[in-house]
Image: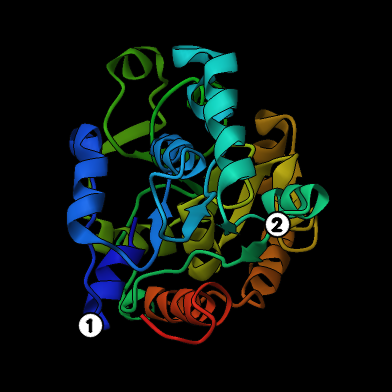
Amino acid sequence: HWLPLYFEEFGHEVDHVFKQDWKYFYLRYLKFKPDVLISVGPIAFMPSLLKKMRLIRAPHVHDWTDDNVDINGKEHGITKMALYEYFTVENADYITTPSIYRKERCDLWGKNVFYIPHGVDRDFDRKEPVKLDGNVKILYAGEQSERKRVDKLIEAVKDLGCDLYLFGKTNENFKYKASDNVHFMGLVNQKDLPSYLKAADILVLTMDNDSCLKMFEYIKAGKTILGIRGKLNYFLTNMENAYLTDDLARGIRALITDEELRSRLNENIKKIQVKTWEDVAEDYLNFLNKEVLDGDGI
């Protein structure tokens, strides 16, 4: 999560409890004595439970960034992850989210919810595109797994006149099955990723999610976005600023053969404003000061 780094940059003390230290969370809380407790991910179940037991007094803000049932349900159990996720949402004092879909759920449930979209690196616009080979270059960045539908993306480009570039830790099982027009690029420095995004013709969002980090980076790159029809419709509009479909192969075929459509989608996606992480952090701090701490400041 980027926000703690910028909170520190703005002069605030932050105790960032990482996954390997979750078992020490309460001891860290007692020692640090925070003015505000912000949680992200499944760990949020812990402060929600402790708050319900009245062992935590600090205001608990849960940053609901992902649908953890979708992400972890298959591996850790749907019921277990649903309990963690919705117990947290119900018992947190405040919810922030970069997702319009999740904000609407919280509004429906009567939760104190605030919409704060993700941002991009401050140097994003300064990055120049690199050179990628191919007539039509398709790019996906992120986890290479079945739950991210990357196997379906690889299958979708078989026998098509395009090149698919995959950035992220290489899935060797996928590499074995991929056709020659699929290029596994491995891990790259996050600060270099904008140069690759700008070099592509089509950027692919394979998750049913309207708030993943890379969605905002894709938008900022100003290139054609191909996405899964579903929650993305809360933020993007099919055939206006993105191509949203339930069939990746059909979407790829439509886009690689219609340069005029890609050009129109490119122009319209550039109309969406994406803030830098500094601006997002400032918005978050303003929210904390105004809504959580009643203007007392942190």
Residue 227 as seen in the image, left or right of residue 20? right
Residue located 59% across and 15% down the image = 79
Checking the image for residue 276, the label placed there is none
Looking at the image, which is closer to me, 161 or 211? Answer: 211
Where the N terminus falls, by quadrant? bottom left
Which residue position holds label 1?
11
Q: Nearer the viewer, residue 77 or 177?
A: 77
Within-10-Å neighbours for mark 2: few <14, some 14–19, many 20+? many
Separation of disc 2 and disc 1 at Cα? 30 Å
Q: Which residue is mark 2?
A: 100
Taking the spot 73% from the left edge, 68% from the top edge, the residue there is 264
Question: Looking at the image, is mark 2 or mark 1 earlier in the sequence?
Answer: 1
Residue 231, picture quadrant: top right
Spot occupied by residue 265 in the image (x, y as percentages of width and height) = 70, 64
Amino acid type indicated by mark 2? Ile
Identify which residue is drawn at 50% across, 54% down. Answer: 63
Label 1 element class: loop
